Image: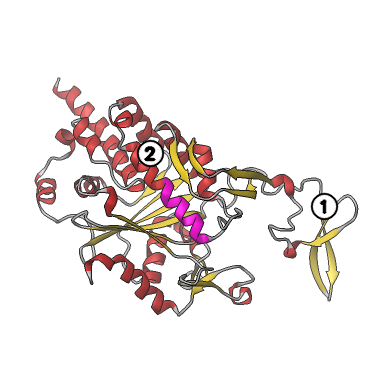
């Protein structure tokens, strides 16, 4: 009996870890621990007891723990390790205030000499340290330490949303996106041909259709893109919509929506809306009273997560998560294009011909803005 007990305990421990990682993505899930009585097996040992009874344990700065949430395409997607979604969650140690700061993928990162969405990919390619480089890059940009990070791929996101029965989302603005990429068709020529030609003494690539009409490859934009077969058209109507995993992913990834939904601000707001809706579903009685569903979530995220959160950290996140209330969560978006935006589009010539965002008033002022938003309610 004693050996069986030990075996069960070992099986439950990884489950708890994945559950807590899931709740970081959805801003914590403490009730599951008590419901399944996993605390009897996990919350043990002198070090853990001290940590749970005091504020010791979790890394923090000025009373806040900062967690970077990353979403990537993963296997089968173009740029599989590029971060399509980046959100910095800053949590007060008392759980009374959570700031979710959405970071646009096109924000330039001087330390990388590239856009910030490439940080995880660069780290993985160089030495398998994607999490570390992403943390260091965000920390250097915003002047605040990033204590932990978690990366989830699209496949895991889709499966997790489906496992909790989908999400009920209030679509505030109807929009159509005729340029949503279809996975696996990124390089499809759609019956066109690409040829090299000489122009002004330089080799350029030309896209030709069956009529002989030609467009320089470097002049193709979403508005004149001839590779129509690479994309599908998304349509979202205003009002309450129940979304499965694939639909929810399309809702957060859409970049070229009409009715103002093609902006960084709108896209970031949709991402935060989905995260909070997922949190609500995970904490619902349908999930908490279904051990099978919880185990399936654990398996799904176990195959889709990369993180530097340790076993000891999970117990402390559970303690912190039990204090957080939905009304304490603030949503902050870094974007360009609005009068109140803190970012602006830079000159492509300064960024290797790429579209990139930079602070309106210099990098030092971006630090001040982000820190001001993080500590806004504390008067620090």
Quadrant, the N terminus: top left
Q: Residue at x 33, y 37 (%)?
A: 282
Q: Gap in Å between the C-alphas at discs 1 and 2?
A: 43 Å
Q: Is residue 258 visible?
A: yes
Mark 2, Cα crowd under 10 Å, few <14 / some 14-19 / many 20+, is: some
Quadrant, the C terminus: bottom left
Instruction: Note whether 220 is above or below 72 in the view shown.
Output: below
Where is residue 2 drawn, in percent x and y? 14, 23
Q: Looking at the image, which is closer to me, 169 or 82?
A: 169
Dominant secondary structure, magenta: helix
Q: Looking at the image, which is closer to me, 371 or 261?
A: 261
Q: Which mark is residue 302?
A: 2
Q: Which mark is residue 161?
A: none
Q: Residue at x 28, y 27 (%)?
A: 289
> Is 166 colored magenta in this rendering?
no
Q: Residue at x 27, y 30 (%)?
A: 11
**In which quadrant of the rendered view does residue 215 lie?**
bottom right
Q: Is residue 125 visible?
A: no
User: Is residue 79 toward the left or the right of residue 55 in the image?
Assistant: right
The magenta stretch spans which residues?
264-274
Residue carrying label 1: 193
Where is residue 225 drawn, in percent x and y? 73, 55
Describe the colour scheme in one phrase.
Answer: secondary structure
Where is residue 88 drawn, in percent x and y? 37, 59
């Amino acid at each position: 009996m004693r050996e069986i007990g030990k075996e069960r305990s070992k099986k439950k421990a990884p489950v708890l870890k994945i559950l807590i990682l899931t709740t970081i993505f959805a801003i914590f899930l403490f009730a599951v621990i008590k419901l399944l009585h996993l605390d009897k097996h996990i919350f043990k040992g002198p070090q853990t007891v001290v940590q749970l009874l005091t504020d010791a344990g979790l890394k923090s700065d000025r009373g806040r723990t900062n967690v970077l949430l990353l979403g990537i395409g993963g296997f089968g997607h173009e740029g599989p390790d590029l971060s399509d979604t980046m959100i910095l969650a800053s949590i007060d140690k008392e759980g009374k205030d959570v700031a979710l700061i959405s970071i646009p993928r096109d924000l330039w990162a001087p330390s990388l000499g590239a856009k910030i969405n490439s940080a995880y990919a660069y780290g993985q390619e160089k030495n398998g340290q994607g999490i570390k480089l992403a943390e260091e890059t965000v920390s250097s940009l915003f002047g605040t330490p990033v204590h932990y990070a978690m990366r989830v791929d699209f496949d895991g996101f889709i499966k997790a949303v489906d496992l909790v029965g989908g999400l009920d989302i209030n679509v505030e603005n109807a929009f159509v996106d005729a340029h949503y990429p279809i996975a696996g068709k990124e390089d499809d020529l759609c019956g066109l041909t690409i040829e090299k030609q000489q122009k002004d003494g330089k080799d350029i690539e030309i896209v030709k259709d069956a009529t002989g009409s030609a467009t320089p490859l470097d002049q193709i934009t979403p508005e004149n893109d001839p590779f129509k077969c690479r994309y599908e058209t998304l349509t979202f109507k205003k009002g309450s919509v129940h979304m499965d995993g694939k639909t929810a992913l399309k809702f957060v990834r859409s970049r070229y929506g009409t009715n103002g939904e093609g902006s960084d601000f709108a896209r970031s707001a949709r991402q935060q809306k989905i995260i909070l809706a997922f949190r609500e579903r995970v904490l619902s009685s349908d999930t908490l009273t279904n051990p099978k569903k919880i185990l399936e979530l654990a398996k799904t995220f176990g195959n889709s997560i990369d993180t530097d959160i340790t076993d000891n950290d999970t117990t402390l996140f559970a303690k912190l998560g039990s204090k957080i209330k939905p009304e304490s969560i603030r949503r902050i978006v870094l974007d360009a294009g609005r009068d109140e935006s803190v970012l602006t589009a830079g000159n492509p010539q300064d960024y290797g011909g790429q579209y990139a965002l930079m602070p309106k008033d210099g990098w030092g002022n971006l630090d001040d803005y982000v820190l001001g938003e993080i500590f806004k309610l504390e008067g620090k």
